[in-house]
Amino acid sequence: MMKLESITKEFGALTAVDNVTLEVPKGQMLGIIGRSGAGKSTLLRMINRLGDATSGTIIFQDEDTVVDVNSLKGQELRDWRTRCAMIFQQFNLVPRLNVITNVLMGRINYSSVLKTLFVMFSPGERALAIRALDRLDVSAQALQRADTLSGGQQQRVAIARALVQEPKVLLADEPIASLDPRNAQIVMDALKTINQEDGITVICNLHTLDTAKKYCDRVVGMKLGKVIFDGHPDELTDEQAKDIYMSGAEADEEFSAAITSTAI
Amino acid sequence: MSVRLTDITEDMVAEDQIRFPRVFSMTLKEKAIRTLVMGGGTLILLYGLNRFGFFSDKFWGSLGKLWTMFGQMFPPTGWDQIDIFAHAIGETLAMAIIGSLIGGILALPFACMASKNLMPIRPIQFSFRRFADVLRSADYLIWGLVFVRALGLGPVSGIMAIIIIDTGILITLYSEALENIDRKPIDGIKASGGGRLQVLRFGVMPQVLPVLLSNALYMFESNTRAATILGIVGAGGIGFLLSDNLRAFEFSNACTIILMIIAVVYVIDYMSKKLRERFIHGDRVSQGHDRPMERVARKMNE
């Protein structure tokens, strides 16, 4: 279970995330929706500490451990990041390395630094990486350079990298925003499968309402850094969706969920 | 199904080794190339060092002399001549500034002619590239010697040498920057009905200007260092005083000059680096694709 308590992030005079409190039970697939600049990415990046919160606490708790995320540093912080994997809108693979090496990057915190610097991973880890690629149907490209792959393939490689981390939580920051509808569907299906089969908690930032409705158990709507909706996707009324996606003058215009749709 | 490392059996590894042998080990060819490169490199290095006497008693015996020389450098002396030194350093700086300014501007039209995307006529583009190669292939000191013969002793010869090298290197650097520009803004300007000059002005220049300025400043740093030694061949500046003092075994005077050179070069490098960061920074800020909020915040802070 993950507990965010009064999380706030300020960039100078701008409050990007404003006093957010959330509780995410183990194994949930949570979608965070909102316009660009609503604070979704900033929130996600604070969970694995790519960015630090200005105030508030993040507690992660499972059978054997309790982690106070904001207080972590050094090796403990790196361990947390391994357990709390992340995928990105732009995939964030290393373009000049081949696919299998990119996936093995998910194992760099599992053995000694010196070994990893010489790309010395055990046969078991290499087999694990291949199995992860198999699962996402990209193992045929294992020896190609990552930048020769299409966007959809790259995102699947990124998911494989996240999987071999053997994470408890998977953060996905706009995972389909750079993909065409077909690839977007493949990637979202993969995230759903991972969530259901592995019991990994997935927290996914999404631009579009219909994707969130289709895939997520729970939707959180953010606007200007604040949570303004939290519940089952079916409970989200048109009025509330309008509030999430529109501001000021626009709000008078007629709203239809279709405008936020990419129809996948 | 989910897979964890503890679920991986030896059979699964064996199976994968057959499916993807290259994931598990390098091919024979790759191993051979690696051994050859590493072994060959070591051999060339050892042979070369031995050939030039790095393993001889003469080399190791003279290290003591070097130490004595260093000893004679301290404490630095010649403070009564400080105004002469300072004047010479000023001349050196002036040489670097004038040479860099003229070279930096002169290189621009040549660079346009040497860029594949701006000069479609291949032979012309090619010959401008080779022209740049000729300019920069001889170093500062060689051009310095040539101009001292032709124009006589003094900073004019040094400035000419700097202009030649600066232009030669900047033609290459500029034209590479010009060739690496993004097509998208150019298509945007064209699609709005822009002509060749307008495309150059609005599609190309805003993209490359920071890079060009940064390159020119980098060359200015390099030129400052070069200008300090051009005096050795008589092409003006502090280098003449330095070599004069070294030849007369006035090591402690030379030390003062060297310290002054280090200070000046350090200040120039620092200022130039700060300026270059400015240009590049302004150019790159917009890359924060996945962090819209931080981008907004950065804009607000500026």
Image (tube, helix red, strand yellow):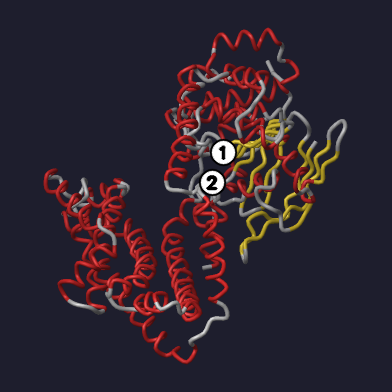
Asked if marks 2 and 1 touch (Cβ < 8 Å), the reply is yes
Whole-angstrom CA distance, mark 2 to mark 1, is 8 Å
Q: Residue at x 72, y 58 (%)?
A: A54
Q: Position of residue A162 (x, y in %)?
A: 64, 30
Q: Is residue A235 visible in this depiction of the protein?
A: no
Residue at the disc numbered 2:
B290
Residue occupying the far bottom of the picture:
B80
Secondary structure beneath label 2:
loop
Q: Is residue B105 left or right of residue B4?
A: left
Q: Residue at x 75, y 38 (%)?
A: A79
Q: Is residue A182 left or right of residue B9?
A: left
Residue occupying the far right of the picture:
A64
Instruction: Tell me the amino acid under the disc marked 1.
Output: Phe
Q: Quadrant of the N terminus of chain B?
A: top right
Instruction: Tell me the crowding category of disc 1: few under 14, some 14 to 19, or many 20 or more residues within 10 angstroms, Cα based.
Output: many
Instruction: Tell me the amino acid under the disc marked 2.
Output: Asp
Q: Position of residue B290 (x, y in %)?
A: 54, 46
The image quarter containing residue A231 is top right
Q: Is residue B299 above or below residue A71?
A: below
Of B9 and B81, which appears nearest the observer?
Answer: B81
Q: Is residue A185 above or below residue B161?
A: above
Residue at the disc numbered 1:
A88
Q: Residue at x 57, y 36 (%)?
A: A209
Q: Is residue B190 visible in this depiction of the protein?
A: yes
Q: Check the residue under mark 1 and report the chain it is in.
A: A
